[in-house]
Image (tube, rainbow, N blue to C red):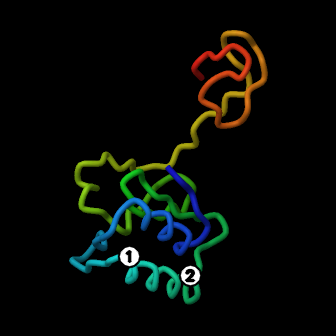
Amino acid sequence: MDKFNTLLEAAQLAATRCGSWSFATSDDRYDVKGLLVLAETSDSETPIDEDSFYVVSRAGAIGLCEDGEDIDWLFLTGSSEDEDLPATYQVDPQINFCPKCGSGVVSGARFCGKCGNRL
């Protein structure tokens, strides 16, 4: 899941993954343009706390994480119903060394650069 400091940044990524959203607590629907305008307005009028952040799911749903853990899903996609949206935000563990050969690995790498082992 991707993490952002502003709703506009989250909406910009979500727009590459989906074309329409519904607000989680109402029947309000948004297309890409409407979501981007709403996000920009929201960021300028009511910015989030410094400890809070937005997350975007693989399908383009947008959530707000105010306490660093619990996610309040704000904008849902048509495929969000099929997507298993998590209730909490968890950081993926970082692998610093290859478990097979012990070489240092590049952050976020999927394979060891030395031996090719899948990380």
- Which structural element holds mark 1? helix
Question: Is residue 113 toward the left or the right of residue 3 in the image?
Answer: right
**Mark whose residue sits in front, 2 or 1:** 1
Question: Image quadrant for the C terminus?
Answer: top right
Q: Earlier in the sequence, mark 2 or mark 1?
A: 1
- Location of residue 81 in the rendering, given as x and y in whole percent from the top left corner: 23, 54
- Which structural element holds mark 2? helix
Question: Is residue 110 toward the left or the right of residue 41 in the image?
Answer: right
Which residue occupies the foreground of this view, 104 or 5?
104
Label 2 Cα crowd, 10 Å radius (few <14 / some 14-19 / many 20+):
some
Q: Quadrant of residue 108?
A: top right
Residue type at mark 2?
Answer: Asp
- Location of residue 115 in the rendering, given as x and y in whole percent from the top left corner: 69, 13
Residue ID for mark 1: 32
Residue ID for mark 2: 43
- Location of residue 102 in the rendering, given as x and y in whole percent from the top left corner: 75, 13
Which residue occupies the foreground of this view, 13 or 64?
13
